Image (cartoon, grey):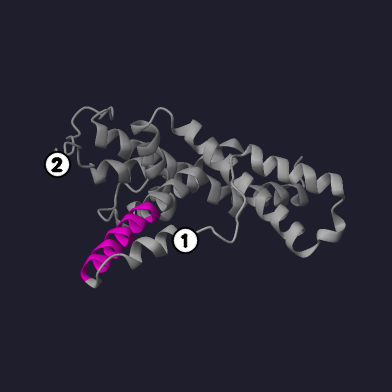
Amino acid sequence: MVTSEVYGTIKGMAKAKTPATQRREQRLQRIEDVAFAAYQMETGNYPYPKGIPRGHKKPDGTHDWNKQELLRLFGWEHSNDAGPLINDPHFQRMLEYHRWRGSDPMFRKKVQNTIWREIGEELSMQIYEQVKFHPDKLSYDQKLKTIKLIVDAGVKLASEKTKNKADELLGALDERERAALMDEQRAALERQLRDLDSLGQAVDVEAEEDD
């Protein structure tokens, strides 16, 4: 016989909601699935269900998304507004990640190289801070080893006669040529910044997959 206390417990369990953390993870997983589907649509490899039209081919050769199909995959099949989904930062990061991986088979290797470079730069700064601000804490042997590492890395030690090549170049140009060169360099740096932001998004996804 089921007592009122047991019945109340069973009823409460039936009404229990999915924890917020679990709901969030489930939502992120659905977004990742949709982002991969969007990438497949771009490359013409999405397995469209029978009767679902493909996205139109764009001038750059890629295919447009069937947004209604993306909404269906996400679970919003009764909605016509894909804006909140495709503008979601996680969707955009995952889409960028798949584009990188699809266009560059050496993507993972390049990501690893970037990580190692960042580690090397961080360690170099720590060594610099130790030498610059706490030289008394370094033994003579440690100082010799540090110099050897620097020389082995192919770095030439600075001297008073070292010239700043950028200043020398800019000083040799007239005002118009200097402005043109600065604009060219500024545009190159902006391109590098965009590439870095794009790579950063993909690296974040790669790190999340490894966790």
Kind of residue at badge 1: Asn
Magenta range: 176-193
Is residue 123 found left or right of 76 in the rendered image?
A: right
Main SS of the magenta segment? Answer: helix
Determine whether the residue tagged by mark 1 lies in a helix, strand or loop: loop
Kind of residue at badge 2: Lys
Residue 122 percent across, percent down from the top left: 64, 51
Question: Please, which residue is most extreme toward the front here?
Answer: 161
What crowding class fits label 2: few (fewer than 14 Cα within 10 Å), some (14-19), or many (20 or more)?
A: few
Provide the residue designation for mark 2: 58
Residue at 55% of width from left, 46% of height from top?
25
Q: Is residue 153 above or below residue 128?
A: above
Residue 135 percent across, percent down from the top left: 81, 59
Provide the residue designation for mark 1: 164
> Comparing marks 1 and 2, which lies closer to the viewer?
1
Is residue 166 found left or right of 209 in the rendered image?
A: left
Residue at 53% of width from left, 57% of height from top?
162
